[in-house]
Amino acid sequence: MKITKKQVDSINNQCANGWELDVQYFLFHGEKTLIKQIQLDDENYLEFAIRYNYKNQVSLHISKYYHKIGENYSSTNGMGKNKILDETQVKRKNVNNLVSFTKNLNDEKLLEINKNTKVASSCGLILESEEF
């Protein structure tokens, strides 16, 4: 999959509240998703991703990351959290539809959603991560 800097900039300019296109996810998976990070303290942050789920519904995925000061990578445990933002099953995955959600999803709203959303069930395959 290819995407130009102009296309990335165009999508990012349409997003509100600090959301942007997750270029790495697009290059690896071929799907346009939007991401935003909220720093919790010096070494921990939450990463939010607006994307389409397997039913073509718009969902919010939340992961908590640990980034040790001085290291070049972050780590996470478990499966994170998922919240369906729109139950409508779309026929076509359109990034403009995802962009429209960024207008209402500011830091305060995202932290509220995180607080009220439980960790995803792993169906016994992987241990659930701790609540965050």
Image (cartoon, grey):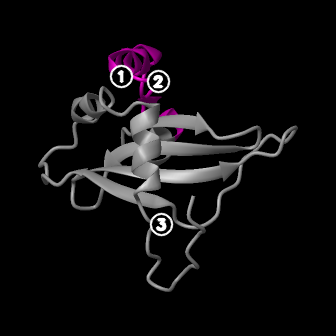
Secondary element at tag 3: loop
Q: CA distance from mark 1 to mark 3?
A: 27 Å
Residue at the far right: name it.
70
Identity, as a three-letter code, of the amino acid under mark 1: Cys
x and y, in percent, of residue 7 in the image:
37, 19
Residue 23 colored magenta? yes
At 42% from the left and 15% from the top, the residue drawn is 9
Q: CA distance from mark 2 to mark 1?
A: 7 Å
Which circle marks residue 15 in the picture?
1
Magenta residue span:
1-24
Neighbourhood count class around disc 3 (C-alpha, 10 Å): few under 14, some 14–19, many 20 upward: many
At 36% from the left and 34% from the top, the residue drawn is 105
**Label 1–label 3 contact, CB within 8 A:** no
Write down the residue under mark 3. 119
Write down the residue under mark 2. 18
Whichever of labels 2 and 3 marks the residue nearer the N terminus, that label is 2
Q: Is residue 121 visible?
A: yes
Is 61 positioned to the left or the right of 69 in the image? left
